[in-house]
Image: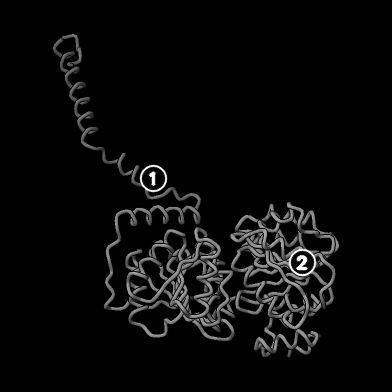
Amino acid sequence: MNFEELKLNKHLLQAVDALGYEKPTPIQQQVIPPILVGQDVLGIAPTGTGKTAAFILPILRKLNYAQGHDPRVVIFVPTRELAVQVYENAVALAQYTDIRCCKLIGGTGMQAQIKKLQQGVDLIVATPGRFMDVYLKGEIYLKKVNTLVLDEADKMMDMGFLPQLNQILEVVPRKRQNLLFSATFHPKVEELTQEFLAFPTKIEIEPEKVVVDLVKQFVYHVPNSRTKLNLLVHLLKKEEGYDRVLVFARTRETAENIHRYLNRMDVGVWKAIHANKGQNTRLNAYEEFSKGLIRGVVATDVAARGIDISEVTHVINFDAPVMYTDYVHRVGRTGRAKKEGVALTFVSEVEHYHIRKIQELIGFNIPVLNLPKELEVLETSYEEHQAFAREIDRQKRKEDPKYKGAFHEKKKVKLKHPNKASRKTIQAYKFIQEDSKKGKKRGGTGKKRK
């Protein structure tokens, strides 16, 4: 199938050609026709499959040209980075039309965004929080909205946006087309689907097929965090092809520490992207990374849904994600635009549980690589060892609610083997009993000795 068969107008076909799209991806082939005829659509597809263009193209086709002052389409996304990506996609695909696009995101000045709204807009890309802030100021009129899109709905549910989405649904016209896209179809998304969509057309692209085909995935078993740092530096210094690298960490503090450490170790220039960074700092790091001005970025999962760079050579999971669907999004940052990529996951003893769950999700056993012989493997600190023990206990209780934990077992052992103080108490008690019996035999009072 080619784009001409999807009934797009000449302006959109011209834009598609200018962007180098050769033929529609599977999600685009299946999603565009039902959107064009006005059906509600539920699209389940991993990142890197052309999902954004799959809903932007038919929306632009239906908008056709600029009209009126107020928005007719609103697209909601969970993060600022993803909002920027979707907005830039919309602008690029609408470049040969007069359709007006606007983005509403936090971390930047609200007044500039309001000023653009006042000039007239057809399509808005927004994060829920900033959208509601602008709406409550009376700067958005929603009576003409006829299409509402929720992109990355699973992440929205994980980030607790449901109350804000419910507020938004109360103020937009009820007669509209609803489109919901997600990388996974977990229970929260299913619940949202029932409330948000009316008799939807469900289209699902299997995540494991995309991940396995385009991304070479591997696991390293690494004993502790310090050895993980040594392995990361070793790969960057000794191995070839690590030209544009994206490292994922579980927490902001870990991401910040890794990025500072790498900048000290003479392995290129690195930037960090996480929620404690200002919006301009994050966007500047993203731009420098996309242009190849820096070697890599260390990020938390806030960036997993917003980085759309086709030249990312490696994704390295310094920590295995505990939200298993995030693995698909992290890995999806490489292997984009039909280019192969490599994804490495550093797995400590405590993370074996998570990698098993991830393998169940993607339906694929990830190959294990041996640690390099010359790598310095450091001992696990007492604090990290204790943290591992507590986390393994938690994992076992999650799998088996009857499991009482290692600390419970230790208490039992202590009761069976009394300490010195308790042994002395027992000996003293026996002595008193024996002395009392002897006193009775002698005809004495049998009083206990003090």
Is the residue marked by circle 2 packed among few (<14), some (14-19), or many (20+) residues within 10 Å? few
Mark 2 and mark 1 residues within 8 Å of each other at the beta carbon: no
**273 on left or right of 70:** left
Q: The N terminus lies in which quarter of the figure?
A: bottom right
The image quarter in which residue 147 lies:
bottom right
Q: Position of residue 15 (x, y in %)?
A: 71, 85
In the drawing, what numbered circle is on residue 309? none
**69 on left or right of 20:** right
- The kind of secondary structure element at disc 2 is loop
Residue type marked 1: His
Label 2 vs label 1, nearer the camera: 2
Q: Residue at x 37, y 78 (%)?
A: 236
- Colour scheme of this structure image? one colour
**265 on left or right of 448:** right
Tell me if residue 136 comes above or below residue 350 in the rendering: above
- The kind of secondary structure element at disc 1 is helix
Q: Position of residue 441 (x, y in %)?
A: 16, 14
In this rendered view, identify the residue nearer to me: 402 or 292. Answer: 292
The image quarter in which residue 442 lies:
top left
Q: Residue at x 71, y 78 (%)?
A: 54
- The answer, for residue 170, to whether it is visible in the render is yes
Residue that label 2 marks: 119
In this rendered view, identify the residue nearer to me: 29 or 146. Answer: 146
Q: Position of residue 374 (x, y in %)?
A: 26, 78
Residue that label 1 marks: 408
In this rendered view, identify the residue nearer to me: 386 or 341. Answer: 341
- The answer, for residue 1, to whether it is visible in the render is no
In this rendered view, identify the residue nearer to me: 79 or 397. Answer: 79
